[in-house]
Image: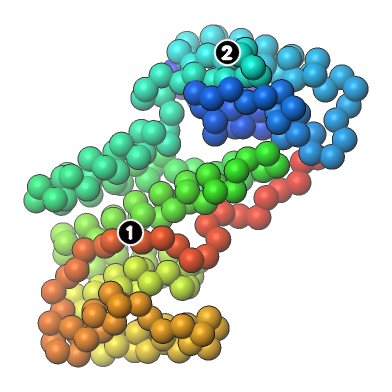
Amino acid sequence: MDAPVAIRGTKRRVLLARLLFDRGRAVPVDRLLDALWPTRPPRSAVANLQQYVHDIRRLLISAGSRATIVTSGGYRIEVPAGELDVEVFEQGLDRARGLRAAGDPVAASGLVADLLGLVRGEPVEDLPTAGIDDAELTRLGELVLCAKELKVDLDLTLGDSDKALATLRQLLARYPFHEPLWKQLMLALCAQGRPTEALRAFAALRRQLVEELGVEPGDELRAVHEAILRGNTAQRRCGCGRVSVPLRAAPQRDR
């Protein structure tokens, strides 16, 4: 499929999203009905569902996509390799990590930048999320954040601390308790010859964690803090740790 295809109608798009989240697995009709009509389905709900499936099948065929919707204990969408952005993203992220490990940060940085170009807002941000697993939505958000952390890490490796700092300021405004970002911020400040500001950043985070969450910074962040105090500011690679704050926008209500 070479060009985007417009799926008109919220219900059709919810249905397609629901099937894609369970790609390769049959989704029972009752679960699809719950996703399409979370409160009170109309009497024609099953017939409407069948029509929506027919419409999506027709659109996929007309677009030249090899993806197909199969009727088998419900409905199952089969998507060939290379046709689903999230799989392309995951595989590309693994390749970028491999390139970095092999000592080619330039190629790794270019690949991550291309991958981030696939990201358009939040997962299903313009659709109601009833019937979609919150854990899957969180996983997608964490995947994107991990790519952004890797890009910052590569920017620092390539000596572009200005770009790294600009990205980190934006990310920390959204994820103020995510310690890997604070670690990168401290390293970026040190890369610019500003270790005092890095130490202040650590102090600010520690105060925030203690006052608001009742916890101390983690071992890795404390190790970076100690290294800065000793004057050892060599860069430490991003670990792409898990995030301790919500990663997606609040779900919108279906109209």
Q: Secondary structure at mark 2?
A: strand
Q: Is residue 162 left or right of residue 233?
A: right
Residue at 84% across, 40% down: 39
The kind of residue tagged 1 is Cys
Q: Secondary structure at mark 1?
A: loop
Q: Quadrant of the C terminus?
A: top right
Residue at 68% across, 39% down: 131
Q: Is residue 242 left or right of residue 238?
A: right
Q: Quadrant of the N terminus?
A: top left
Question: Which corner quadrant of the image does residue 26 belong to?
Answer: top right
- Residue 181's place in the image compared with 219, above or below, is above
Residue at 26% across, 62% down: 238
Q: Which residue is mark 2?
A: 70
Please identify the residue farthest to the left as the structure is shown: 103
Residue at 26% across, 84% down: 225
Q: Nearer the viewer, residue 249 or 42?
A: 42
Q: Which residue is mark 1?
A: 240
The kind of residue tagged 2 is Val
